[in-house]
Amino acid sequence: MSHPHPELGPPPALPTGGLRIVALGGLGEIGRNMSVYEYDGRLLVVDCGVLFPEDAQPGVDLILPDFDFIRDRLDKVDGIVLTHGHEDHIGAVPYLLREKPDIPLIGSRLTLALVEAKLREHRITPYSLTVREGQRERIGPFDCEFVAVNHSIPDALAVAIRTPAGLVIHTGDFKIDPLPLDGRVTDLRALARLGEEGVDLILSDSTNAEVPGFVTPERDIAPVVDRVFANAKRRIVVACFASHVHRVQQVLDAAAKHKRKVAFVGRSMVRNMGVARELGYLNVPDGLVVDSRQLEDMPDEQVVLICTGSQGEPMSALSRIANRDHWIRISEGDTVLLASSLIPGNENAVYRVINGLSRWGANVVHKGNALVHTSGHAAAGELLYVYNIVQPRNVMPVHGEWRHLRANGDLAVATGVPRDRIVLAEDGVVVDLVEGVARVTGAVPCHNVYVDGSTVGDVTEASLKDRRILRDEGFISVFVAVDSSSGKIVAGPQISARGVVEDEAVFDQVRPRIEDALAKAAQDGVNDTYQLQQFVRRVVGKWVSESLRRRPMIVPVVVEV
């Protein structure tokens, strides 16, 4: 297997007739999916999603792909193909279109409706082209054919990209569900036909490559949801992804059967389900869905709330409910149904929410104790099936952490793909398809771009380190005023702390050390306030480390009077 090297340099010029692929997100991580295809100086972007922050990124709202690779070539971008409507594939589109609003968006009816609803909030009106399975469109030099695939959202598409360099299939997120709720199966006949034509490279979803067999069909979830409703004595709160139309439909069906009213809670849930209902992807019987405030006057046994927060996101409706920071108050005997899988890295946040809900007396039903969710990603058996049908010459695993990418590569090798034709890359690594062979040829800078409130890209790794120190170790400020001529202390040291100790009297032990250090500096003729601040920082830091076993942020302020 070819793989990235930490010392990869800039790639050479793309050979004439070659196709270049650079992932700006989605490799080595679950989320932030974005790939850039380059042929003859023109660019095609496939997906443009976000990644949600982890505990090590306090204060961050979203993480975007790094657009620097294409920022000065946005006029060369012929279009953005969106495989489906999940946030990790469309969430960064508004941030890219802020830089050039007239880049065309290409996607299915539901996908474009979801992204257009997001863009309205950013006051952007996009140029869009609606496509469906079986359709072929020329997008610059890229001849794109769209193929129906199953996923945990309707209208998902794979895309086959033809150029003189060869035929490439980008699967997007997919699975093979033989009995999907909407009757729209993954088009294996189309994949087989493309395989007969000759597939030079396939970029394949890796998320479930370690999971043996086939994914549980969506239809198997409905009886379990029905049982949860039958056993619930009081209110039911369901948390799922705001775009999981199939799961919401199952909840609506169960609510109608058990004579309950349903309300959507959370801006993204209300927006997305409104779009899905308007386009006919969500079947809602008359009178079933009501405004959430109407439920306050209804008996608990007739109430269902569908909200966001199945991944423990701090500001989501479910997290706020668990923290008693929401108008919905969980009571003894309520049932909470987490109808989603755990995204790797979110486990602690999810279990924190489950514990918070359990504390208030809720019966929490989740994937760990009931079959209330099935994945939208192909398991190993399905991936093997696709490789056998397509018989690609080269394979590039995408959409997954390193363990998923390697497992996916091993599956392809098992079906007969030569090991040296498996390309394992990470974000920023350049892969060129030249004369039927795909190989790593270099790397471009590719960093996390953080959205923090209204700012984009201003947060650095250094500032995140400072935030982690403030969160974990606390903060100490030291104020000292010294005489400008003699250097002697005329006020202070005044010490304040947050998150370090309960009783600030403990700092009486370090004040003499500060005074001694500044007195010695005065004797040595040191009067630069910056240097004096460093003396104070070192004295206080050494004392705190020895006495309190802590490493807080220390901010010394020395002024001359």
Image: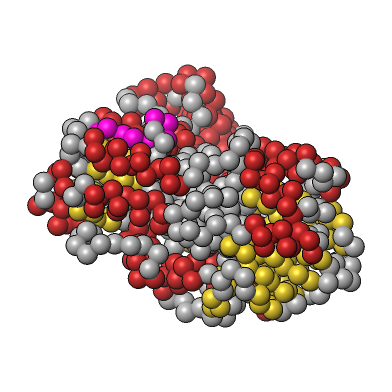
Q: Residue at the location (45% across, 71% down)? A: 113
Residue located at (19% from left, 62% from top): 287
On the picture, is 293 further left or further right than 2? left
Picture coordinates of residue 239, whole percent (x, y)? 34, 46
Judge whether 98 appears above or below 499 on screen: below
Q: Position of residue 133 (x, y in %)?
A: 58, 68
* Image side of residue 463 versus residue 238, left or right: right
Q: Does residue 65 appear in this view?
A: no
On the question of residue 414 being in view, the answer is yes
Taking the spot 46% from the left edge, 68% from the top edge, the residue there is 110
> Taking 484 as reference, is 195 left or right?
right
Residue 120, compared with residue 200, is above or below; it is below
Residue 64's place in the image compared with 135, above or below, is above
Main SS of the magenta part reads loop
Q: Is residue 366 magenta?
A: yes
What range of the chain is rendered magenta? 362-369
Along the line of sight, the residue nearer the viewer: 72 or 26: 26
Q: What colour scheme governs how the chains and residues are painted in the rendered image of this protein?
A: secondary structure
The answer to which image quadrant residue 76 occupies is bottom right
Q: How many marks?
A: 0
Say which quadrant the N terminus sits in: top right
**Does residue 175 show up magenta in the picture?**
no
Position of 534 compared to 1: left or right?
left
- Residue placed most toward the observer, 294 or 200: 200
Question: Looking at the picture, how far across and down is residue 240, in whole percent?
Answer: 38, 48
Of 498 and 350, the residue lying toward us:
350
- For this rendering, which residue is in front, 208 or 176? 176
Where residue 33 sits in the image (x, y, percent)? Answer: 60, 56
Q: Residue at x 53, y 69 (%)?
A: 108
